[in-house]
Image (cartoon, coloured by chain):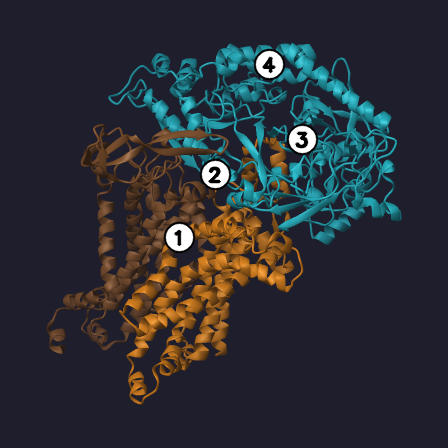
Chain colours: A cyan, B brown, C orange
Amino acid sequence: MKITLRNGLAIVGSVACAAWSTTAIAQSCTAFNEAPMLAANVASGALPPVADRLPAEPMVAPVAEQIGTYGGTMVDSTGGNRLAEFRHFGYEPLVRWSVDGGEVIPNVAKSWEVSDDATTYTFNLREGMKWSDGEDFTADDIVFWWENVETNLDIQSKPRGFFKVAGEAATVSKIDDYTVSFSWSKPHGLFLENLATPYGVRVVQFAEHFHSQFIKGLNPDGVAEMMAAAGAEDYTQWWTANVGSYGKQSEYNNPDRPSVHAWIPREPFLGKERFTFERNPYYFKTDAECNQLPYIDKREWVVTGDPEIQLAKSLTGEVDISRVNISTPANRSVFFDNMEQGNFRLIKADSADMNVANFQFPENHPDEFRASVYQNKDFRIGLSLAIDREELIDVIFLGQGEPYQVAPSPRSPFYSEALAKQYTEFDPETAAAHLDNVLPEKDGEGFRLRPNGERFTVVIAVNKDFKSDWVDMMELIKGYWDAVGVDTVIEVLSDATSVSRRGAPDNDIGLWLSENGAGRLPILRADEMLGGDKDLDWWKWHETKGAEGTEPPANVQRMLVLQDLIPTVVGEQQDAVVAEYIALLTDNFPRIGIALPSGNYRAVNNRLRNVPEPLMEGWLYPGISPANFSTFYIDPSK
Amino acid sequence: MSARIENASYGVLIWRRFKRHKLGVLGAFITGAIYFVAMFSEFLAPHGQGTYKARDVYAPPQFVRFMVEDQAGDRRFQLHVLGYKSSVDYDSGKRTFVPDPRKIIPLGFWVQGDPYKFWGLVKMDRHLFGPVNSRDRVYFFGADRLGRDVYSRTIHATRVSMTIGLVGVSLSLILGITIGGLSGYFGGFADLGIQRVIEILQSIPSIPLWIGLAAAIPPTAPPLQTYFLITVILSIIGWTGLARVVRGRFMALKDEDFIKSARLDGNKPVRIIGRHMVPNFLSHIIAVVTLAIPGMIIAETSLSFLGIGLRQPVVSWGVLLQEAQNLKSISTAPWLFLPGLAVVIAVLALNFLGDGLRDAGDPYES
Amino acid sequence: MARFLLRRLSLMLLTVFAITVISFFIIVLPPGDFVDRLVLEANQYGEVFEQHEIDDLRRSYGLDRSAVEQYLIWMRNILFRGDFGYSFGWDVPVADLIGQRLGLTALLSIVTLLFIWTVAIPIGIYSAVKKYSLGDYVATFVGFIGLAIPNFLLALVLLYFSFRYMGQSVGGLFSPEYVNAPWSFARVLDLISHLWIPTIVLGTAGTAEVIRKIRANLLDELHRPYVLTARAKGLPETRMLLKYPVRHSLNPFVSDLNDLFVKIISGETIVAVVLGLQTTGPLLLQALKEEDLYLASSLIMFLSFLAVLGTLFSDLCLMALDPRIRRQANEGDLM
């Protein structure tokens, strides 16, 4: 990892803190405290005492404000059948992101070793850690998952991409009961980071003692019986509906299914409009004062699809944390007006995104003239300089944010001021000059023309169901681009019509998200800064090593090579590759960004404490679940 | 009295009966006024429908004032509004607008403003009433989230909303009379088949039908084409009701003596239908049609609410209401709902007009 | 009579069958399926599906087969196993979902219907009796104002009013503490306190039609000779009104009852979406948007079936009330 003075200190500091708190717990906890809710069961013998339920070395979770008190119910809203909702049920992967997303820290695994050549990752699990049904969590469970779920052709045709290096799937071996290793013949430069993303959570979600009964290969008769009872004919369909892998809500629906999360369901909840999870008595974390987490006894979810209803539920104080899709700058005034009546406060939320939006140029557009224009850097520079970002930020984002290009965020170790700030000034004259180099001819109304005399028109498609403020943003940008002679047409799509347009080869300039800018996230999806899928021909050439597609220019070739290289190297070598990649990006300027996302917030009920500020939104950093929900507590006095 | 009835013509009789229905007369006037606005919308609106000023996002409505006071303290008559001093407070999420007594925006008649093409033909830039200085902007109904003038947009939307009703209803009428007439006149298997189709169409819930049909509209279609296709969608549901009514009337009239004699006379079916049957229930049809228009207007707003109706750059009341349909508008910018008032007035006016027409429809009824 | 019933029932089955085909193909025809929508939505928050995951998903939902094949499987499951299929979006069988929501939908519709009658019939009668008076105009105006205000607008305004100034909970017909609670007097009160918004919004939209009909029918009746006779004989006005003309004018009303009911059921979708109610309307809307094939098709089929059944029912009612129509049916003239 790149050691600058600033983040060097940060790393040393956080490592020291982690070490301090971990050693503190190992030395000073002679007895543990548990929630009163469990006391009766422990007294009657239904549950073992807390010291036996926790692993020998529990994970110590840091608290945002202070040590909390047990009890209470936290109410949340879920969109019901949205795929992303599962992350709100809990975030307990093998290794996880720190709260600020800057580094990967232990979770289920208490520590790990990486071989010098980065071909083998060995994880040390926690001795004595148990599933929610009291059975031990061991390396067997991870090996079981790998052999019977992830690589099981009956269930899915391939393992997820990051489990493979150069096409070779990992070798997962049990070293002993509490040690497991992943190895390949070539180095893997991003394995830990990928494990911390939502895609890595699956590793610790399948208990061998419970799930073996559902594996066709291990229990053919039993499975056949169960399938017949459900009237299912296809094993994959039945597995998806009843057992569920990554992201399916059915994964959490069976209360008998063992889990390592802080709260677990006590009855099936799918299809209900309101349901409750209760605390997991075997949860493996404590706070720094030997109290077993979570503090909160129950979590309740209410299903609401309509955004205005979600908003209203936050305003009335029914829901404790507002949803991200309604916590927009536009709605801030409504929240503010209802703060007293709803008894909530507004907490700042950062975004892990690189940019509020970015423009992608189809440099391999079938129309050759158009492709040549988009490949010309002057065109992109001109368009970028023509945008009055300050005005846009003022109108659309309530004045929050700064002009920014598609680049890692300021606090990321990969931040580059040049890449982030170039061409963000509002300078229509210079813009026009650059554009004159590409499309010098203009018609009577000042619009630039193709060589054949027709207007050169760009068509930007915006999905209004996705982000309605993008439609407004495009209205403003259309004005800016029209002013420098580029005829711009906005095409408003809906969810329904977006589907039919995806991947169409003649799609024009695209407006899309620009994510993964914080912390180490930029290198997890390095292709986002360059943009691969729009330039199909070039990418195809690179993938097939020249057999198909068109050969890209040398600098683009080099960037594609570097993109592939990043996940295969570690340490200083990785840093050097990333630095070269960013330098080339700065030079080539393939995408236009608009502004650094800012001004996000969440409305949090005043009774809910230990909520870190700022929170962080994101996907590969699955905001806001890494905020240590298990350390939240309810203070009834507020 | 009876002599007057017997000697007066059909049209005069209807007019006399209509006049008695005061609400109907009121409805007729208002409807006429609305269609007038629809015809001359570009001229009547102070601004174009899409022009905006980014600094005026969510500006509250401005009231017309009459007297200006200059430095000497003299007061004189000058129609004007006061400009705003605005600032953004991020914490409360609000933009505050304070009327600034020093920013006087004079208003006048026959002023120069945003250019437009009158009915798509003649280039003009004169507006009936608006800011004297063409760079100024005035917000009688306030501004929306992009800084566009709600009053101007409402006026422009009048044209689309009122004509969608007309076009849609005409289509329904043609379909309804043709199909209903065929069904009622010929009876037998044709009637059976058509009745089944009507029953199927009426049994399917309207929303899935709308969404299904709307999915067939290509997203790249030019706004005018989208507009036309939407009216087709609306009329596809509407014609069934009309067809049933027509069919019922046809079946009733079929057995009347004068129709039988017309047939015996050797008249062709088309002539019988057109010359003898249709005039008999024409007044009823007119009433039903007039009453169907407001239904179309409301249906158009519903389509926009569902997200499958018209969209920018076409502006209709439905589009405006859909943009206003959120809690933020209610709590911080309620003027965005003023197009709803236009809908209410239009729908009420048309309903009263239709009721009046229907009441006046049969002058020979005692 | 039996022949009439038999003929109608067989026609009804034909209609319902045609409707199942139409409803299935309305959903299948637009390009893209549920998995495409899922992937699109996932992309919107940053998730990237690998191609094999998309193929796996499609296979697990049975969407990799042809449309005709899917339809036949669906029909076969309904007819032979009573299984309406699986909702991709909710991960539960369709029948469970619909069953849960039917109760509230029926309740809302019935309450709305009662509201409409209670408000519209008196206004209609008054309007007819005092024709062209000021009272007539005011009453008509009041009755029509609900029709003129778009439903979604009124619903949102009332919703805001109810939680901002009345402190009510939003997003359902029950407050949070009563959602899963057993029935009690308090729960009924809670239900009523939430029902008022959708009832008023839907009800006011429906009153105009009913007022018009009652007024028109009553006006027709009032001109009949028997009314003149009754008046001449000295029968007090109100008694005379209620005893004869009003009852007769309600006759054609019965035949349109079915229409009104269907209108309420389809109108409740928009109101329920705005208010966040757990009725069948929003369920269908969401299923359509997501191309949740079996849920949407089953719901459409179900609602259409109800509508067709309603037509038959109202025809039967008419026959029971009016001997002329009974005769027509027996002679095969009534279709």
Tell me if residue C156 comes above or below residue A4 in the rendering: below
Q: Residue C230, image x and y in percent?
A: 32, 86
* Mark whose residue sits in front, 3 or 2: 3
Q: Nearer the viewer, residue A490 or A234?
A: A490
First in residue order: circle 3 vs circle 2 = 2
Q: Chain of mark 2?
A: A
Pinpoint the chain carrying mark 3: A
Give the amino acid type for the residue marked by disc 3 in the picture: Pro
The residue tagged 4 is A562
Evaluate whether label 3 is on the same chain as label 2. Answer: yes
Q: CA distance from mark 2 to mark 1?
A: 22 Å
Q: Mark 2: which secondary structure?
A: loop
Disc number placed over residue B10 in the picture, else none: none
Q: Chain of mark 1?
A: C
Give yes or no for contact between labels 4 and 2 (Cβ–Cβ under 8 Å). no
Q: Position of residue A60 (x, y in %)?
A: 77, 29
Residue C311 to residue A602: above or below = below
Say which element carries label 4: helix
* In front: label 2 or label 1: 1
Image quadrant assignment for residue C190: bottom right
Mark in front: 4 vs 1: 1
**Marks 1 and 3: in contact by CB < 8 Å?**
no
- Find disc 1 in the rendering and name its residue: C150
Q: Secondary structure at mark 3?
A: helix
Helix, strand or loop status at disc 1: loop
